[in-house]
Amino acid sequence: MPIPAHLVDRTPEVRAGELLAGLVPPPQFAGATFAKTAPTRPIPSQAQALATMETLATRLAKPARRSLFRKAPPPPPSVYLDGGYGVGKTHLLASLAHAVGPERSAYGTFVELTHLVGALGFAQTVAALSERALVCIDEFELDDPGDTVLMSRLLRELADAGVCLVATSNTLPEALGEGRFAAEDFMREIQALASRFEVLRIDGPDYRMRDGRPEHRSLTDAELEAELASVGEHARVTEDSWPALLAHLARLHPSRYGRLVDDVDAVILTGAEQLDDDMVGLRLVVLVDRLYDRNVPVRLSGSGVADLFSPRMLTMGYRKKYLRALSRLGALAARPLP
């Protein structure tokens, strides 16, 4: 059994240039390809989205030819992938970025791109991303007015520079029968760009939670110790108390959370308790996203995964983020330890 390290002992630094270089699909989707996105059962909207992304990749993979007598063809229309949790949107987006190639594409979550603007400045971010043929924005978020205005302006500048944009977001599971719920919100917030986007709705169940929501039951301390004892000798495992980790996250900028869990094979958290503070909850969401990107197994004692966010938090404005975090954390809690 390895001796656990502690995330609270890590204070990573991330340079602005490293943020830009890191705009590639996360390790979780390092091997994503269109061939691996076939749905487990025939779902027409998934097949349509796959075909559209394959066609888009073909058009973007090679630079458009210019000549003295003919203008270069316009870039392909931008695409918005609209659907619920776990229907394969991120896999499609990562597959597209891989197909186009790292030299001609940039891939980041909404949060990562807002962090990039904060680190580089708006003008430098536009200049850097305008050199790419494709910019992929995963998990476009509409619940922070300031960040939404910033991202809308960034998208407008990039689209004017001829960059093809592909974005994803989530429709709440209970809203799937209400038509293009998330798409309408997205188009309203990017009014100046709405005509440039093609909306693709992707239906289907959440593949991470085919048996329902994450479990309410957590591991006992004895069960946690037994699992830790089974971990391989050379595995890099961290063990932290829930209050200590949350306090540590408050001292780090969220752009550093990815580096915080780099090279970690498993994360163990003891004494987890339900949250009822949105500032704390939003920091936890970012950490869960970075853990999910890296496919890091997580184990909790104390509160069960399904009970980490209070009922109030799951009914208010940030509920999409919290529900996504529960879906992803539930998947990580089910992964075997190394």
Image (cartoon, grey):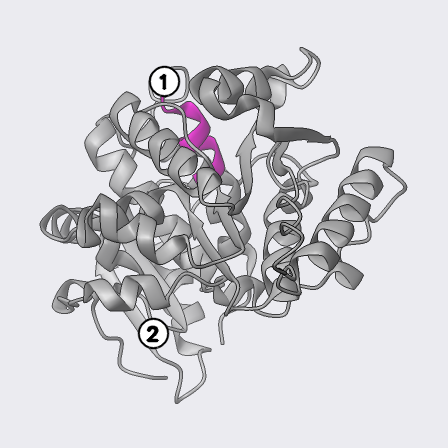
Q: Nearer the viewer, residue 54 or 230?
A: 54
Furthest residue toward top: 178
> Is 72 situated above or below 174?
below
User: Which disc, if any, is residue 237?
Assistant: 2
Q: Amino acid at mark 2?
A: Val
Q: Mainly helix, strand or loop, the magenta region?
A: helix
Q: Quadrant of residue 259?
A: bottom left
Furthest residue toward right: 42
- Looking at the image, how many numbered discs can be counted on the residues? 2
- Specify whether residue 321 is painted magenta: yes
**Residue 141 in the image, given as x and y percentages of width and height:** 41, 31
Q: Give me the residue at 51% from left, 47% from top.
A: 163
Give the magenta range.
318-325
Q: Secondary structure at mark 1?
A: loop
Which mark is first along the chain, 1 or 2? Answer: 2
Q: Give me the residue at 30% from left, 33% from top.
A: 274
Nearest-to-viewer mark from 2 and 1: 1
Q: Give me the residue at 18% from left, 53% from top.
A: 119
Q: Nearer the viewer, residue 120 or 36?
A: 120
Q: Nearer the viewer, residue 111 or 74?
A: 74
Q: Residues within 10 Å of mark 2 (few under 14, many from 20)?
A: many
- The quarter in which the N terminus is drawn is bottom left
User: Which disc, if any, is residue 160?
Assistant: none
Q: Amino acid at mark 1?
A: Gly
Residue pointed to by mark 1: 317
Q: Quadrant of residue 238?
A: bottom left
Q: Residues within 10 Å of mark 1 (few under 14, many from 20)?
A: some
Furthest residue toward bottom: 234
Q: Is residue 302 visible?
A: no
Q: Is residue 9 visible?
A: yes
> Is residue 264 left or right of 185 when viewed as pictured?
left
